[in-house]
Amino acid sequence: MESNAREDTASFGDLALRPELLAALSSLGYEEPTPIQREAIPPLLQGKDLLGQAATGTGKTAAFALPVLQTLSEERLGKDPAALVLVPTRELAVQVSQAFHRYGRDLGVTVLPIYGGAPIGRQLQALDRGVDVVIATPGRALDHIGRGTLRLGGVRTVVLDEADEMLDMGFAEDIEAILDETADERQTVLFSATMPSRVDGIVRRHLREPVKIQMGRAESTDGGKTPLVRQSAYVVARAHKPATLGRVLDVEAPTSAIVFCRTREEVDQLTETMNGRGYRAEALHGGMSQEQRDRVMGRLRAGTADLLIATDVAARGLDVEQLTHVINYNVPSAPEAYVHRIGRVGRAGREGVALTLAEPREHRMLKAIERVTKQPITVEKVPTVADLRARRLELTRAALQESLLTDDLDRFRVVVETLTDEFDIMDVALAAVKLAHESSGIVADDEEIPDVADVGGRKRPERRTGGPAGRRRASGDDVARLFLGIGRNAGIRPQDLVGAIAGESSLTGRDIGAIEIADRFSLVEIPESAVDEVIQALRHSTIKGKKPTVRRERITPTSGPRKKTPTGKRK
Ligand code: AMP
């Protein structure tokens, strides 16, 4: 936004909305208006025309629906519609109608979507009975106007939603013809993700001194100092989001993660879903008492929860030291919210990770965020079943390696010896690995998640080697892995290793790649060229008061990402 939307923390109550609307918003779990709602609702309530540059995901639908509902309910009318919303597609017509229904449920407002491809009979009946708001695609609206079944003389507000798309779809003349049917003194609202000159033409012809609102134009405010955060997005259909989140968590294996949701309802539902899938997730939202919130934070700090699922409001002012991952379950409603969220990781030279689950329609919001942060968000492929299997085998391998290095295995020797009388030793080992693998307690998830990353017309970057998540590698491709004989049992955290290496050698936190911490050892990826220097340096220093063994570790080319066990499934 152009203004200081972030500082402006107006609540829905401050926007002078009717109690019925406030009740509906609260029951939907909306905690505060999005920036576009904060800016658009007051002038729209005053009856002004408005030009909003905003993409899907910003909360633009509520930004125009709430004022329309508010004014409708102030002055009830006859049978003809008082508001008309034009949208490019049938899908959007349905979505916008649902939004009007949900927000206006206590106001008794009637809403009708009309679009091509649906039987016209039912639409005729509904129009005949009388409706307050019509949400229409331009072609079908014109059809009804021609039949005399849609009369627009009483329309006080016209909204052109996703105007650029309507023009791209060839609806320019239809829109002009429809606007001609409405009264000159109507209020006109236009939302568009982009502002090509053709949209400008409509604005000049049909909007009167519009208030202008532009999303995603703010300059980055950190003076160019960007945090050390790897930023990726996964583009998936809404129905596949919970499964995608689970898979991404398994592959990323965060030490501690916060997942941001839009509403309280979403927080509660997702927390339940993730707990059902075996993750230790805790909900945090504005509907909870301070005492409940303190208990949640206590569990997170004590390590009995791995995943915090929260709304922005609830997470405000929260300081979680060990946070490694910020996950946006939806694209945030404004770039500022994104920047604010990811500021929670990548502190003090540690690598942080920000992951965003975006629906296909939301790719424009990702672009807006990239513009503001001046940092790329890489669209990654959702980890496949094969990626996941490789990852799990890698975990089994790491567990066996740890046991080989540190456990006293002698009491099992008799088992191996008896079996090798009859079987090849390799086969004995294979059977033992199978049993170890199957007893890890990880539930197999073997349904592929459809990849829709190309829907937005973007090219997906080549995946890098080194793991399903295309994790940022130590700079360049020549990566070596160091083995340090100190791990979780000694209280080692990734930041301790980064601190020790960056503090004792010429490397910076950025040069350090994946870190895997097992109970009794750790593995750290660093540039091949720095191996000798780092080993030398670490041999002369202590980590957490100890002088661990440091040596080069062989990298198996086929191994998946190298990190510790998945969130929530730690042994
Ligand atoms: P839109 O950009 O209008 O497509 O809205 C994107 C999503 O954000 C929809 O799922 C809305 O239900 C949701 N939403 C809109 N406003 C808010 C809000 N103030 N708080 C939480 N969620 C919202």
Image: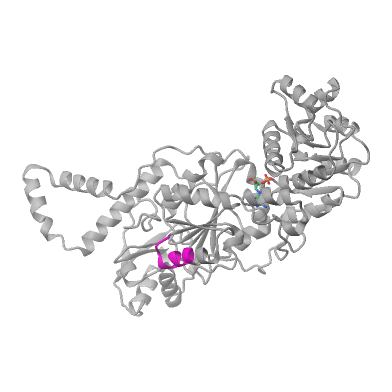
Q: Is residue 302 magenta?
A: yes
Residue 163 x %, y %: 78, 39
For image coordinates 81% across by 54% down, the residue present is: 42
Q: Nearer the viewer, residue 337 or 181?
A: 181
Q: Is residue 66 magenta?
A: no
Residue 14 x %, y %: 75, 60
Q: Is residue 95 above or below residue 294?
A: above
Residue 112 x %, y %: 74, 32
Q: Nearer the viewer, residue 569 or 302?
A: 302
Q: Nearer the viewer, residue 388 or 287?
A: 287
Q: Is the C terminus in the top left, top right, bottom left or bottom right quadrant?
A: bottom left
Q: Is residue 558 visible?
A: no
Q: Quadrant of residue 179?
A: top right
Q: Quadrant of residue 514?
A: bottom left
Is 511 on the left or on the right of 153, as rendered? left
For image coordinates 19% across by 48% down, the residue present is: 432
Q: Nearer the viewer, residue 148 or 190?
A: 148
Residue 383 x %, y %: 45, 45
Q: Is residue 366 above or below residue 158?
A: below
Q: Is residue 42 visible?
A: yes
Query: How many discs mark residues in the rendered view?
Result: 0
For image coordinates 71% across by 43% down, the residue present is: 106
Is 120 on the left or on the right of 466, as rendered? right
Is 532 on the left or on the right of 34, as rendered? left
Q: Which residues are magenta?
A: 295-305
Residue sticking out furthest to the right = 184
Q: Is the N terminus in the top left, top right, bottom left or bottom right quadrant?
A: bottom right
For image coordinates 32% across by 53% down, the residue present is: 395
